[in-house]
Amino acid sequence: MAADLGELLVPFMPTIRVPRIGDRVFKSECAFSYDSPESEGGLYVCMNTFLGFGREHVERHYRKTGQCVYMHLKRTFKEKATGASGGAIPQRRNGKVFLDLDLNCDFNGDDYEYEDEARLVIFPDHYEIPLPNIEELPALVTIACDAILNAKSPYRRQEPDSWDDEIQVSKHASGLRQLDNGVRIPPSGWKCSKCELRENLWVNLTDGSVLCGKWFFDGNGGNGHALEHYRETNYPLAVKLGTITPDGADVYSFDEEEAVLDPHLAEHLAHFGIDMLQMQKTENGFTDSGVSPRISEWEVIQESGSKLKPVYGSGYTGIKNLGNSCYLGTTMQVLFSIPEFQRAYVGNLQRIFDYSPLDPTQDFNTQILTDVSIEMPDLLDITHLRATGLQPKEEELPDIAPPIVVPDEPKAPEIDESAVMQLAEMGFPLEACRKAVYYTGNLGAEVAFNWVIAHMEEPDFAEPLVVAGFSEIDSSLSAAVPVADNQPPEESVAILTSMGFPRYQALQGLKATNNNLEHALDWIFTHPDSEEESEAASDIADPEGNANASASANATADNEPNGPRVRDGPGRYELFAFISHMGRSTMCGHYVCHIKKEGRWVIYNDHKVCLSERPPKDLGYIYFYHRIPS
């Protein structure tokens, strides 16, 4: 059997790699979908690129790349059996395979057990080899399988606490100077010494002054006398009255401009007659004052005090937070609520999948300071900002044409032929060697060799070198002739038209982007045309048209205005979404978004999606408006 497996894998051995340092092993999620080892079909990991694919997408990758060997990972959950005493039998795990995967948060480890399976699958016949199979597999395959099973998932956050808004000990706490001025703070009945406000009060830990804080977004607050006092005295630390309990209190450092910890807080408060052990958390020292405590920014934005109704279904699916991905998640929720975005990406889903690059995880098409309260209107009218032409007493800027620059005659690229031959003698294709030397600036065979290693898996690796302005560069360089025009190659046009785009749009996109297929696709998405424009443009862009095409082109070109094409319309807009941030800076904290759907505001807080009761429109980080049709 060992010999049989070895012989079976021999044709595929050149395509099986051992993950090296820096290689990312996508063994927890599909590159095109949310399929994982926990999905019904499991996950297939390519043994060459280490990309993960769900059952629906692995066939496409096989047909596109010819890669035949994949590792199939499957995790199965099942409810724990109940023991004779009524308790759950301890969690059981497959003792042969240990997949380094995070447990799905929807399964409680106390109620469920899971089992991991791994096997090699050879396409197209789907021949399966159970793992581990150390004695029967070639050593290289065994090492590669072991390395993949033990590799860290690139989706797992690398710094678990990188986004936590952790409060640090103040640098002023240990050596804080306190004045012996005889000040004693009563246990209740406080008021600002400058304006007599009785809420949002802070006691300065240096001189015992009781002063009001700044105005807050929820309508409470003060006149900023505590901050004003710091600017006059440089006394850095203050404690908010009403938050003092035996467990601690809210301490703020004006110098460090953030909430801090004071390990000597009890001693500092006792200096002014405050006994932490006797204090309770109230607004003004009265447990029955009837004054509502200040609501924090986190509570307002997340609507924490409300019993929100969860919603489900299409358009109401949350996105799991990977530890530092809440900003990306909220942004994508808003983008996917925009019809134009849906048409550009969701509507072209299969075509984008089919023509994605070899590493789709790095392709956008495939993966697609607060504390300030600003009242943003639901309806925004900027009609009064619309330009109406030259006004009285205004002077039109002179129309100065840019200088005409005549480009130099293009020169054939210089290639160090000796370096090319050194690489070719190593067994690499000649055209690939020429490209390596050219793209590394003729810096020698060693540098070019590194380029070869980094690009040898690309589909056009061995194709002839093509330089802008020149035809293919052959080995003798004698045939290097400047290209006469910028006519898009038919193969690129065919690819775009096969994705459903009209031929005229394919031609326009390629011409506008110097025949760059990927950029042309983006150009088409961002330049929608009306039907009338489409018909005219079709005659202009397609050189294969009839004899009337050139006349039509000239007439249309004369009538069309210069400059970028934009969609004009009324100047009235409606708010349909906003993203909010919580935390002292954009480098920490948390993001959520609110989106208006079907006339209702919905809050998206990572994987939780609920109907919003009080959308905090004044606490947005980014606001999204769309034009109201006339």
Image (cartoon, rainbow, N blue to C red):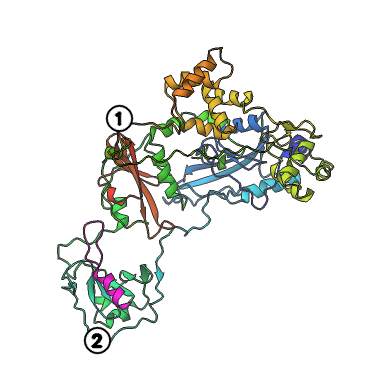
> Which three-letter amino acid code belongs to the residue tagged 2?
Asn
Residue 100: horizontal and vertical position, in percent?
57, 50
Find residue 48 and name its label.
none
Query: For this rendering, which residue is in front, 385 or 276?
Result: 385
Q: Is residue 243 visible?
A: yes
Q: Residues within 10 Å of mark 1 (few under 14, many from 20)?
A: few
> Which residue: 43% across, 59% down?
164
> Which three-letter amino acid code belongs to the residue tagged 1?
Pro
Horizontally, residue 392 falls left or right of residue 147, namely left
Residue 506: horizontal and vertical position, in percent?
54, 25
> Which residue: 41% across, 64% down?
166
Q: Is residue 54 above or below residue 581?
A: above
Q: Considering the image in quadrants, where does the C terminus appear?
A: top left
Query: For this rendering, which residue is in front, 249 or 471?
Result: 471
> Which residue: 51% across, 25% down?
505
Query: For this rendering, which residue is in front, 143 or 386?
Result: 386
Residue beneath label 1, please? 629
Q: Considering the image in quadrants, where does the N terminus appear?
A: top right
Horizontally, residue 127 falls left or right of residue 186, namely right
Residue 229: horizontal and vertical position, in percent?
27, 74
Residue depth check, mark 2 versus mark 1: number of the one nearer the observer: 1
Q: Closer to the N terminus: mark 2 or mark 1?
A: 2
Q: Give the secondary structure at mark 1.
A: loop
Look at the image and say whether residue 214 sits in the magenta stretch. yes
Asked if the residue under mark 1 is in contact with the one under mark 2, i.e. CB atoms within 8 Å, the reply is: no
Q: Which residues are magenta?
A: 212-234
Residue beneath label 2, please? 181
Look at the image and say whether residue 533 sits in the magenta stretch. no
Q: Is residue 106 visible?
A: no
Q: Residues within 10 Å of mark 2 (few under 14, many from 20)?
A: few
* Distance from the alpha carbon under mark 2 to that under mark 1: 68 Å
Horizontally, residue 378 falls left or right of residue 470, namely left
